[in-house]
């Protein structure tokens, strides 16, 4: 093989590998999610998660969610935050409410790398409901809902996982359509 073509072939292989990430990992908020990037790096690229990213920054959780983990994040979309009562997000983002904001955000994080298959296996073994304890300390519950999964907080409020199994270098993300409140 001509030595001048080797760099071109190597570049094509790298481009192809990058394309494979997008094919094997769901697109979120119009952006490719790369399993080689952290939760924060990927979330920052999603146009559907700008409120979540702003909240993570305001709570001072960027370093934690950029760390080695692994973490599983149930990531509410901007539309999920918009369903909260008027003024809730603005109130939570105020510096004096940092502890409350941190509690809400860490209620969306479970230690470990949990896939939809893991949720299904645990639900099957537990009579139809999988329960995971969040970093915040309270449980989130999951039940089969049609072809996907419903997520429920301790108060009985429910939402849905809309995009499952978005691999990250330091964990897993599942996009949800509702903000869970501890």
Image (cartoon, rainbow, N blue to C red):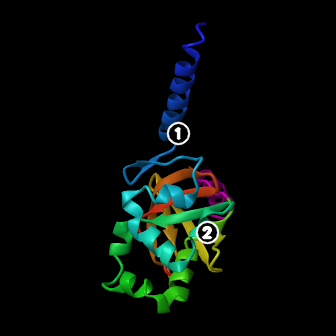
Q: Mark 2 points at which residue?
A: 63
Q: Which structural element holds mark 2?
A: helix
Does 117 lie within the magenta span? yes
Does 175 lie within the magenta span? no
Residue 5 figure quarter = top right
Residue at 33%, 74% in the rendered image: 82
- Spot occupied by residue 95 in the image (x, y as percentages of width and height): 47, 88
Q: Which of 3 and 176 is in front in this view?
A: 3
Left/right of residue 82 with respect to residue 2 in the rendered view = left
Give the label on residue 21, or none: 1
- Spot occupied by residue 52 in the image (x, y as percentages of width and height): 45, 69
Residue at 38%, 54% in the rendered image: 29
Left/right of residue 109 with respect to residue 58 in the rendered view = right
Q: Which of 97 and 123 is in front in this view?
A: 97
Left/right of residue 1 with respect to residue 161 in the rendered view = right
Work out how far the residue at label 1 is from the one at label 2, CA to CA, in angstroms. 24 Å
- Spot occupied by residue 35 in the image (x, y as percentages of width and height): 58, 47
- Asked if labels 2 and 1 touch by Cβ distance under 8 angstroms, the answer is no
What segment carries the magenta color?
113-129
Residue 61 figure quarter = bottom right
């Amino acid at each position: 093989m001509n030595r001048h073509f080797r760099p071109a072939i190597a570049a094509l292989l790298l481009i192809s590998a990058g394309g494979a990430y997008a094919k094997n990992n769901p697109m979120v908020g119009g952006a490719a999610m790369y399993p080689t990037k952290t939760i924060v790096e990927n979330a920052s690229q999603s146009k559907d998660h700008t409120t979540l990213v702003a909240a993570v920054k305001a709570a001072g959780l960027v370093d934690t969610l950029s760390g080695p983990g692994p973490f599983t994040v149930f990531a509410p979309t901007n539309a999920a935050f918009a369903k909260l009562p008027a003024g809730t997000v603005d109130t939570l983002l105020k510096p004096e409410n940092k502890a409350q904001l941190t509690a809400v955000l860490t209620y969306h994080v479970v230690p470990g790398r949990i896939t939809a298959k893991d949720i299904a296996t645990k639900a099957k073994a537990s009579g139809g409901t999988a329960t995971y304890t969040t970093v915040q300390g309270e449980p989130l519950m999951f039940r089969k809902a049609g072809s996907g999964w419903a997520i429920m907080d301790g108060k009985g409020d429910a939402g849905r996982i809309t995009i499952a199994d978005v691999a990250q270098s330091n964990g897993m993300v599942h996009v949800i359509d509702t903000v869970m409140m501890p």
